[in-house]
Image (tube, coloured by chain):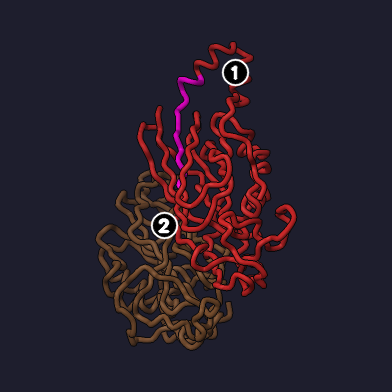
Chain colours: A brown, B red
Amino acid sequence: MRFFQQKQHPHLSSYLAITVISAILLTLSACGDSDNNDDVSNNDATYDITVYNLTNGQPFTPLGIVVHNSAYMPWQLGETVTIGLETLAESGDPSAFLAEANADSAVVMSTSSSNGPFGPGSSETVSITVDHSASLQLTVASMLANTNDAFAGIRNWNIGGLAVGDSASTMARVYDAGTEANDETAGSMPGPAAMGEGFNVVRDDLDRLTVHSGVVTADDGLLTSALNESHRWLGQAAKVVVTRTQ
Amino acid sequence: MTGNTRSTTRNGFRKHSLALALAIGLTTAFAANVSQAATWDVTITNLTNGNHFTPLLVTAHDHDTHLFQVGMPAALPIEHMAECGHLDPLLATPEVGAIDADTIANPATGLLAPGSSTTAMLVTTETHLSIVAMVLPTNDAFLGLESQHIPSEAGTYTYYVNAYDAGTEANDEVLMTAGACSYTDSGMMPGAPGMDAGMNGTGVATADSNTMIHVHRGVLGDQDTAGGNSDLDSTIHRWQNPVAKITVTVTP
């Protein structure tokens, strides 16, 4: 997806560096675990997390994925969002959101999908391995790239109760981060329909999280919109399926 | 608008029941079957403002059976249902099978109007429920309950379902003016039962970007009954999800 590379991402290089370091750390910890592969008391749980893009015209940016217990609260309706979530919702870059998660003692691990944005009809799967506990919860967030600050998300979804071989499925609604006016102009949205700005620190909207009212588009009378009717969605934008494989 | 017009339930034995009956005697098998089966009273309510549902398919099955899966391509029988409201192709699939005690077609004996409800009574030993019907007037929108697990305990369980886009036809929002609906048509909505649509629309959209089954983005419509892009009325035919409420009352 060309737009993601063409966009200026001030955090992209650091994001990549963090990813590489995280990958190394993960590899190291995986090496440590591999010594215990034959140990029947091994408490590892592996989850395959698949996100389906159920929109017609909205690329999803790389997934921000956090596994945690119930004390972690990534967002709340009616409340101001963090700068990390604002960055994710406006630019698609999940690194600041994940860094905030990592600083939270209730977070077990966080990661991102690695294949860049993925379009309508596509899916992305991330496999994670963590120490199992019955209280594990999952949070996933991804920007709808052809918007000002919309993201699809699920939060605090219990996955700790899944037995090996079990799957569970849920649908993600679309939230408005409330940090950028929904003007839908070409200059203000980073996705391929606009190629405009991503993150901007100015908060010129409600500055609180709401359920997104959808995009209006030029086809429905917002003549300054860079979007057309194909970019609309209704309510839920993604399906999230989690399968425990270990 | 054609569609399946057969009336509700016909009693019938499943194949395994029939084999069992042949093996150990009809009376015994029938009694055993009845004692294990639960009754599901399934009520479907149309929650939209201005959309009709074509004849509903209500079918019980095991946990491995999927009539459709959101995020995956629509099989041809689903395309028939979503584009034209035809149920016969689904009733010919091994996943659904013929109409019997736990596969009921067209409980409303026709279209289900906005605000209306219908009930299908299933007698089943199965664990999962799927329900589909086309949303009219659209190109290929359908309401779908996707392989929902139904508890075996007595009680009433409520589910709300989305309208999905089969991903198989351009949402041009242009009404057919003649002929019978076919899944091979490119575009063209088969009917507007509320008699509240326009005409001469030039077409809203070309082919879907998402060719999988996905959450329908809704219709656009316009306020030009004699032209414009759409034959739909933007003040009547839009919806928000959920489009249907489903209650299942289980009697073990």
Image side of residue B183 versus residue A36, left or right: right
Whether residue B234 sits left or right of residue B4 in the image: it is left
**Looking at the image, how many numbered discs can be counted on the residues?**
2
Q: Quadrant of residue A74?
A: bottom left
Q: Residue at x 53, y 52 (%)?
A: B143
Looking at numbered disc 2 in the image, what kind of residue is underneath it?
A: Thr
B91 or B204: nearer the viewer: B204
Coordinates of residue B242 in the picture (x, y in percent): 44, 55
Q: Would residue B35 be counted in the magenta stretch?
A: yes
Mark linked to residue A7: none
* Residue B20 badge: 1
- Residue occupying image coordinates x 48% and y 52%: B114
Identify the secondary structure beneath mark 2.
Answer: strand
As measured in the structure, the alpha-carbon distance from the residue carrying label 1 to the one carrying label 2 is 47 Å
User: Is residue A28 among the parts visible in the rendering?
Assistant: no
Labels 1, 2: front one: 1
Residue bounds of the magenta highlight: B33-45
- Give residue B116's position: percent from left, percent from top: 46, 47
The percent position of residue A17, horizontal first and vertical second, equals 43, 79
Q: Quarter of the image holding residue A57?
A: bottom right
Residue A129 visible in the displayed image = yes
Q: Secondary structure at mark 1?
A: helix
- Which residue was labeled with disc 2? A129
Which SS does the magenta portion mostly show?
Answer: strand
Is residue B21 positioned above or below B227 on the image?
above
